[in-house]
Amino acid sequence: MTDAQISIEAITDKDGRARFVDLGRAFAANVENNVPQLRSEQLELVDPKENPFFFHARVQLFIAHQHGKPVGRISAHIDELALEMPVEQGFGPGAGMFGYFDAEDADVAAVLIATAEKWLCDQGMTRVLGPISLSIWEEPGLLVKGHDHPPVIMMGHHPGQYAAWIEKAGYTCAKTLFTYELDISHDFSPLIQRIVKSGKRNERINVRPVRKSDWDTEAASILNILNDAWSDNWGYVPLTPEEVAYTGVKLKPIIHEDLNMIAEVDGKPVAFMLTFPDINDVLSRIDGKLFPFGWFHLLRWLRKPRGSDMRVPLMGVLKEYQNSRMASQLAFMMISAIRVSAAGKFQSMRGELGWILEDNQGMVAIASAIESKTNREYTVYEKTLG
């Protein structure tokens, strides 16, 4: 496929995947406030033998070339599990995706997007959503607000002009995702404190740190709650047992027990809240490189990430407790316990919550109650094909 001397290469091997990742890193390096990520981790995410997403997905990577040099990239992919979801939850039959989108200019962007759309059409897809890179659980959406400060752990960071290029190709907003920031150096309002104290007096409730010594069991419990809690949410796709195991292994190095909570009612785990220290703090200092000395700084940071920002990427409450006073009480109890540990033991001053769907009224209300403010906005776009 060519347009104004733009040619498209379909990636089919390990060498191509490495060039695909390195091209993305080159683009990211030119984005203001970008934080370089570990290349090994990025390679693993696009490796069919390593990332269990590929066990239930069809993926094609493309690189655009012009005048003998790479000028852009994109992925086109189909999650077989997403095809089984109800249409009203975002995906459903005929819904493909694009992701890992980078382009040197509007012309390259147009060719790349058209290439992804054609591949999806050839695979029988009738709709496309994106950018989603690759799983909905990894990096959904395009950053459209919040370019003026660096991203925290596991957050996408994209050039401002990409939105216009995607919209020019006929895409409209399917869903907006927000992140919220808050000052965690002081306690929450008296109302929240009263709610937390009331919960502590309830003998049925036990909010406890995760047990890293039994991390496999804890991770499985957390992700089982997640699959139940999020099953009616827009964009939800169930996590497979392989993904649960893979995620547990990847998260363990950044898990600190007193930053991650499980809430039990009558001895049964019913809710959780995960909090990750912002590894971007150290990645920015080592320029995303482990060698020659980056590994030393990373290991030292992992042991005690003093002063780092904190991110709450995931929380969930079993559906049987949702829309009840206890659900919000459990959330406030967990976030209050985490705030005390983060501000005390880790000397953190700032936290982020998200992503949170724009119409997730319960989470938006919790974010408002703890006096957090939106600081980033991501858009997931959609388009009908054919």
Image: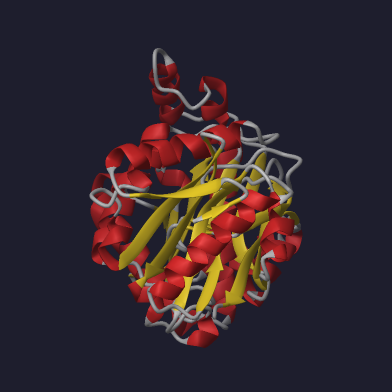
Q: Residue at x 68, y 69 (%)?
A: 364
Q: Is residue 300 left or right of residue 163?
A: left
Q: Residue at x 39, y 17 (%)?
A: 291
Q: Is residue 39 left or right of residue 306?
A: left
Task: Inspect this view and state whether residue 230 appears.
Answer: no
Q: Quadrant of residue 163?
A: bottom right
Q: Quadrant of residue 152?
A: top right
Residue 33: image location, x then y, percent: 68, 34
Residue 89: image location, x then y, percent: 52, 81
Q: Is residue 51 above or below residue 300?
A: below
Q: Residue at x 33, y 65 (%)?
A: 58
Q: Residue at x 56, y 47 (%)?
A: 6
Residue 230: image location, x then y, percent: 47, 74
Task: Inspect this view and state whether residue 55 appears.
Answer: yes
Instruction: Say which quadrant the C terminus sits in.
Output: bottom right
Residue in front for this viewpoint, 255 or 199: 255
Residue 299: image location, x then y, percent: 39, 24
Residue in front for this viewpoint, 13 or 220: 13
